[in-house]
C-alpha cells in the first residue's frame, strides 16, 4: 500500500502557492517492490501548489511571468514575498527580508507584491494564496521548492536550494505528473534498456508522465540519491515510479519493459480512486 505520509504534509502546506512581484531586486510485478514515500521535506515541496492553468491575466500576472522568465534565463532562483503594504510596519519588514535575501549564498531575484493591489488578485488565485505575509522560493524552472508564512529567515530560504534534478522532480509532481526517475549512466549496466522502456512509456502517456534521468555518479545529486536510497557507486540501473502525490510507488532494478511501467500507473490510478489496497 502506498504510504499516506503525503496527506499529513498537505494539511500543513495547503495555504501555500505562488505570488506576483512588482518590485524586483537582483540580489546576492516480479521486478517491482512497493517502497516508502519520499522524505517529509521533499513531500512538503511536492505538495506546494504550482500555478493553476485557468487564471485570468492581469498586470501583476504579466509582471510575474517576466520575472520568472528572467530568472530562468539567468538560471537563478526567485523569492516571491507578498504582504499587505498598508499594514503598519509592512514596508520595514519587507526591507529587512530583502536584506536577508541579498546575503544568500546564490544570486536570487527578490519580488514583492501588495496583496491589496487589484491587479494581483488573478495571480493570487492562480497560485492559491490564502494568507499573508507569505514567502515562496522557486527554482529556475519555476518549481516551488519551499514556502512558509511569517518572518523571512536565511535558514528557511536556504532549504529551498535544491539540486537540478530535484527541481525537475518537483516541477513534474506540482504539474500532477507521474515521474519515471531513472538512475542511469555510462558506468551503469542496463542503462540503455531502461532508457528505452521509460522513454517509450512516457511517449505513450504524453502530458501525464515524465522521464527524468540521473547519473548516480553526479555529485550534485548526492542528496537526492540518498533520499531515494540509491548508491552513488551503483553498477545496475534503477528506476523509481513516483506518483503525483510524491510517493515512490515502485522500484525496478535493472531492465524492465514499458508494460512494467504501465502496471505501475494502473496501481497509482487505483490508489487515487480509492480502489487500491
Image (cartoon, grey):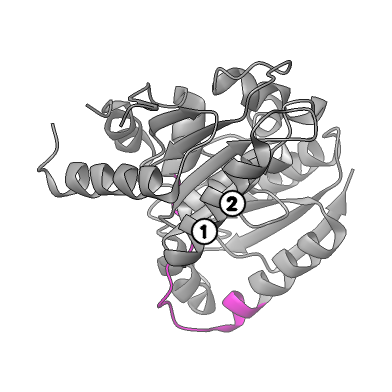
Query: x, y (%) of residue 253?
Result: 51, 26
Q: Is residue 106 visible?
A: yes
Q: Is the residue marked by circle 1 packed among few (<14), some (14-19), or many (20+) residues within 10 Å?
A: some
Distance from label 2 to label 1 (Cα)?
Answer: 6 Å
Q: Nearer the viewer, residue 271 or 44?
A: 271
Q: Residue at x 60, y 82 (%)?
A: 59
Q: Nearer the viewer, residue 158 or 91?
A: 158
Query: x, y (%) of residue 121?
Result: 45, 73
- Mark 1 and mark 2 in contact (Cβ < 8 Å)? yes
| Vertical placement of residue 189 versus 141, above or below | above
Label at residue 182: none
Residue 237 picture quarter: top right
Q: Quadrant of the N terminus?
A: top left
Dominant SS in magenta: loop
Report the magenta residues as a range.
Answer: 48-62
Q: Is residue 266 magenta?
A: no
**Does residue 196 appear left or right of residue 141 in this picture?**
left
Q: Is residue 136 visible?
A: no
Q: Nearer the viewer, residue 14 or 166?
A: 166
Q: Nearer the viewer, residue 58 or 217?
A: 217
Label at residue 196: 2
Q: Quadrant of the C terminus?
A: top left
Residue labelled with disc 1: 200
Amino acid at each position: 500500500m502506498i504510504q499516506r505520509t503525503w496527506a499529513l504534509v498537505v494539511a500543513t502546506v495547503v495555504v501555500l502557492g505562488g505570488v506576483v512581484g512588482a518590485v524586483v531586486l537582483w540580489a546576492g510485478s516480479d521486478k517491482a517492490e512497493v517502497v516508502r514515500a519520499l522524505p517529509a521535506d521533499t513531500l512538503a515541496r511536492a505538495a506546494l501548489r504550482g500555478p493553476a492553468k485557468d487564471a485570468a491575466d492581469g498586470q501583476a500576472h504579466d509582471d510575474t511571468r517576466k520575472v520568472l522568465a528572467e530568472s530562468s534565463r539567468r538560471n537563478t532562483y526567485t523569492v516571491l514575498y507578498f504582504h499587505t503594504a498598508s499594514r503598519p510596519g509592512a514596508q520595514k519588514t519587507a526591507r529587512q527580508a530583502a536584506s536577508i535575501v541579498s546575503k544568500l549564498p546564490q544570486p536570487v531575484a527578490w519580488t514583492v507584491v501588495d496583496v491589496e493591489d487589484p491587479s494581483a488578485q488573478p495571480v493570487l488565485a492562480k497560485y492559491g494564496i490564502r494568507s499573508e505575509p507569505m514567502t515562496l522560493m522557486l527554482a529556475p524552472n519555476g518549481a516551488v521548492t519551499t514556502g512558509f508564512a511569517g518572518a523571512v529567515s536565511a535558514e528557511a530560504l536556504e532549504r529551498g536550494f535544491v539540486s537540478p534534478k530535484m527541481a525537475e522532480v518537483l516541477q513534474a509532481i506540482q504539474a500532477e505528473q507521474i515521474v519515471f526517475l531513472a538512475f542511469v549512466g555510462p558506468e551503469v549496466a542496463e542503462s540503455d534498456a531502461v532508457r528505452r522502456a521509460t522513454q517509450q512509456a512516457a511517449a505513450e502517456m504524453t502530458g501525464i508522465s515524465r522521464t527524468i534521468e540521473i547519473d548516480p555518479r553526479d555529485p550534485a545529486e548526492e542528496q537526492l540519491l540518498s533520499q531515494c536510497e540509491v548508491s552513488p557507486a551503483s553498477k545496475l540501473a534503477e528506476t523509481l515510479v513516483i506518483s503525483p502525490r510524491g510517493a515512490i510507488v515502485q522500484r525496478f532494478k535493472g531492465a524492465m519493459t514499458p508494460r512494467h511501467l504501465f502496471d505501475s500507473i494502473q496501481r497509482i490510478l487505483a490508489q487515487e480512486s480509492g480502489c487500491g489496497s
